[in-house]
Amino acid sequence: MNGFLSKKRIIIFVLIIAVASGGFFAFSYVKNNKLSIAIKSFAALDKISQLLPIQEDTKKELAVVDELVQKLTEKNDKTWTFMLLLQNNMELRPGGGFLGQYAILKLKNGEVVSSTFEDANLLDQRITAKIPTPYPFERMMQLKKWKFRDSNFSPDFPTNVEKAKYFYRLAGGGGTFDGIIAVNATVFNDVLKLTGPITVPGYSTEFNSENGFLKLEEVVEKQYLMNPELDTQNRKAIMKKMTPIVTNKLFSLGNISKIADLAREELRNKNVQINFSDAGLQSLISSVYWDGKVATDWGGDYLMVVDSNMGALKTDYYIKRNINYEIDFNGEKPIATLTMQYRNTAPYGDWRTSDYHSYVRIYAPQGAKLLDRKMISPPIVKDEMGKTYFGSLLHVLIGGETQVMIKYELPDTVTKDNYKLLIQKQSGVGDIPVKVTLKKDGKEFNQEQTMIKDLKFEFK
């Protein structure tokens, strides 16, 4: 992997990481140090044959990476304009996390030439159009107007990209974008696994891989929420000091492959999602499955569980999930039974945490028919993106757990012969233990995996 894993070619990822933790100050640091940048890319989909995992083919990934690197670092005086969506996945939304900030970054000849950073609320204040919110924002959060900060309400990243650009235009934003990049906040903790704990001059807090983003959120938010009289102008000053510390520690590791592995994992688990306006570049991204797209060309069984935190707090940090999916072909019709356990491990409620309130959508093959449900509200059933989804409300008390069950009949397009299953992972949701049980011809077959990315199962 040698050459193209040089410092020069992974700076863009470090830049994105820094933005996730530090916003505008990351841009300032990179710009002032005149670091060249390029995009590092990897694949996102394991193939599992006969309910057993097989090795990934990295050849195609490397070819895509090389082509993107060459394209984005070409010295042809072309200016690339990117929008970065900074998402806090401790407050989970279908597209990753709550969209609290965004940034506009311009690159030319491999260098940062300009950057801007703004809270999403400030952009939303400039939107006068009255766009009705999707269900259930009004019912659960009393929000009647749909705006930029809630634009990532689809599990499909290309859909969210178009919505973000739409609301940006409604707020008076002009120009076009060569790409949109979404970054989830927990990337910061993953970076600290490499660098080790850090401290910032002038602050007594130590940041490590277990508490990094939680501690950072306390510094920049807690005291201001508890005391509205405090001046908020400099509440993110810590970011300016933190960004060069993190970046320098990354490069002092002396092991570029570790940073490359981090980049690969963040792209695989959808903590970083990228969308290009150029059809050729977008095709490259799609070919290695890290475009954040809901699969529309999959011919077998399908499952995607999509949560949206409607409690307005950061309770997702404490939510632990597991999934059991059973497919039974022994009756007249194929029957799927999905059981999901939600545990709210928060010890108590505070400024950041409460009982968990989610609007969950369960995506199944188009034509699936609901048979039974437990511990969720009567679902809204709709067809979307070539799928049928069941949308319900669920609640998990602090310190408690909720066992959700939904049973549905699969369409005739799903057969026991050459059965295959794709389970897609929601961006920002974290690792989820998954057990798949296939019943056919009086026999039972099981597979257990941890879903850190999309999973694909085949049975022949």
Image: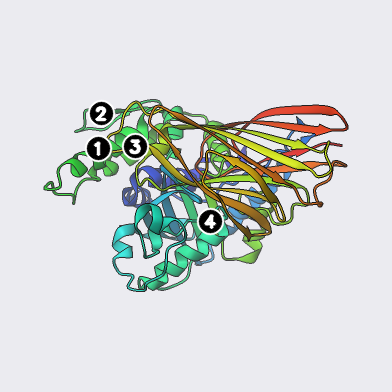
- First in sequence: mark 4 vs mark 2: 4
* Residue 43 makes an appearance in the image: no
- x 52%, y 42%: residue: 376
The disc, 2 or 1, on the residue closer to the chain's N-terminal end is 2
> Which is in the foreground here, disc 1 or disc 4?
4
Cα–Cα gap, marks 4 and 2: 36 Å
Is residue 204 toward the left or the right of residue 292 in the image? Answer: left
In the image, residue 253 lies at what x, y percent?
46, 28
Instruction: Name which residue lies at 36% across and 32% down.
Output: 212
Residue with the mark numbered 4? 154
- The type of colouring in the image is rainbow
Residue at which label 2 appears: 205
Counting residues from the start of the chain, the first of labels 2 and 3 encountered is 2
In this rendering, the answer to whether 114 lies above or below 30 is: below
Q: Can you tell which of label 4 and label 3 is closer to the viewer? A: 3
Do residues under tags 2 and 1 come within 8 Å of each other at their CB atoms?
yes
Tell which of 18 and 318 is nearer to you: 318
For disc 3, the marked residue is 354
Tell me: residue 41, above or below residue 81.
above
Q: Nearer the viewer, residue 292 or 324?
A: 324
| Circles 4 and 3 in contact, beta carbons < 8 Å | no
Among numbered discs 4 and 3, the one appearing first in the sequence: 4
Q: Which residue is mark 1?
A: 219
> Is disc 3 surrounded by few (<14), some (14 to 19) or many (20+) residues within 10 Å?
many
- The secondary element bearing badge 3 is classed as loop
> Which quarter of the figure is the C terminus placed in?
top right
